[in-house]
Amino acid sequence: MTVWWNDGLPFDCTQCGKCCHGRGDVTHVYANYQERKRLAEHLEISLPEFNRTYTQALDTGHRTLRFVDGHCIFLDGPTCTVHDAKPVQCRTWPFWDELLESEETYREQVLDFCAGSQVDGPVVSAESIRAQMKATEKALGEP
Ligand code: SF4
Ligand code: SF4
């Protein structure tokens, strides 16, 4: 299938942390069971304690990371304090289905604010983008 990003997209994250802040109606970072377990192990605490302290439950049965002062609870300045154990959706942003729907959506939701997407290279291949979209979909589908 041909898509507008068939030749890949340039991306080089500057680690500015801006995408860890809430924007408009974007205030959720989902963490499924496996992701929460990995985060709890990373922090050397139990899963129930992790759930209580760092997440909130949604009516859908999913859990999201808590936001404090408008940003993810694990953000310290521009730095993710759980980088090695962060959820899939943090690893794959901005290569999500909804953000790549059209060039216009990508411009509005990503290019206009993410410095890492405003570069000439390196180029992330369409194959890698597809794999990241798939991984995101899978992770978000699990409670
Ligand atoms: S906003 Fe872009 S450049 Fe900044 S941390 Fe997020 S992905 Fe990286
Ligand atoms: S877990 Fe880390 S990368 Fe993900 S939103 Fe929180 S601070 Fe950002």
Image (spheres, rainbow, N blue to C red):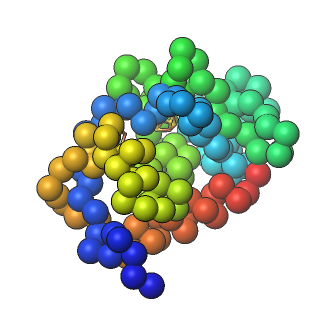
Q: Residue furthest top?
A: 69
Residue 73: name its quadrant. top right
For residue 37, side relative to residue 3 (left or right): right
Query: Where is residue 103 drawn, in percent x and y?
Result: 36, 59
Looking at the rendering, the quadrant in which ligand 1 lies is top left
For residue 143, side relative to residue 41 (left or right): right
Query: Where is residue 87 drawn, in percent x and y?
Result: 55, 47
**20 vs 71: above or below:** below
Number of numbered labels in the structure image? 0
Q: Residue furthest bottom?
A: 1
Q: Is residue 63 visible?
A: yes
For residue 44, side relative to residue 82 (left or right): right
Query: Where is residue 117 drawn, in percent x and y?
Result: 27, 49
Quadrant containing the N terminus is bottom left
Residue 69: name its quadrant. top right
**134 vs 32: above or below:** below
Q: Residue at x 63, y 33 (%)?
A: 65
Q: Residue furthest front?
A: 104
Query: Where is residue 8 drawn, in percent x and y?
Result: 29, 69
Q: Residue at x 76, y 51 (%)?
A: 143
